[in-house]
Image (cartoon, rainbow, N blue to C red):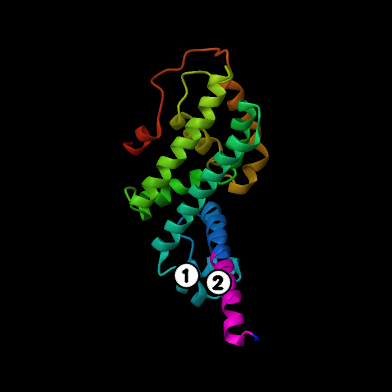
Amino acid sequence: MQTPVAARKTPRLRADALRNRERIVTAAREMFVEYGPDVPLDEIARRAGVGNATLYRNFSDRDALVRQLIYSVMDRTIKAAQIALEQNSDPFTALERFVHTVAAERISALCPMIARKFDQHHSGLEALAQQVELLVSEVMDRARAAGQLRPDVGVGDLMIAIAQLSRPPAGTQCLGIDRFMHRHLQMFLDGLRTPAQSVLPGATVALEDLRHL
């Protein structure tokens, strides 16, 4: 028996709605990076190629959009760590690929949004942060166990460096730093290799330490 037209259309509409939602989140990520967290939502809708009504149907306000954007970037960070653990035989190469992939997510752009627009102690965000810490710790532990990573570096150290090195200098265009970012990240990564050439000041930094700043 032929499927009714309405029933046949439902999956397609759901897929369309999902694509629209993903396009909005992608556009928001790009524009928050370029212009900061106060970019008009109308401009985000225009960049995503959807109408204002579609944006507000998916996200009731700016807080809802920021929350979804943070979840999206955290999810992608988790996937990058999982890929590093699954697909690379050399532990330090896996760490390098993870760092370069996550830097391209512009996690530094999320810092002001989390501080101003989002509950840092939201249960969903805390659960994702814990998963990130566990997976990145595993990536680092493998390199450390192989004798490739200096022992006095923690997950917090790594994530701070990624955020700082992917942040554009004051007065420069955000996306214009791309041609320097990966070069400087590799310089930093080379400094993580053993044998260590110096003693680091202070103590090893964990993600938990960053939550209390």
User: Closest to the observer: 150 or 1?
Assistant: 1
Q: Tell whether position 18 is magenta.
A: yes
Look at the numbered disc 1 and give the secondary structure of its residue: helix
Magenta stretch: helix, strand or loop mostly: helix
Residue 103 visible? no
* Dot label at residue 17: 2
The region drawn magenta spans 3-21
Q: Position of residue 24 (x, y in %)?
A: 54, 64
Q: Is residue 169 above or below residue 13?
A: above
Q: Position of residue 51 (x, y in %)?
A: 55, 76
Identify the residue under disc 1.
58
Q: Residues within 10 Å of mark 1 (few under 14, many from 20)?
A: some
Q: How many labels were placed on the picture?
A: 2
Tell me what residue is drawn at x 61 percent, y 70 percent. Answer: 49
Tell me what residue is drawn at x 40 percent, y 30 percent. Answer: 206
What amino acid does circle 1 point to?
Answer: Asn
Q: Tell whether position 12 is magenta.
A: yes
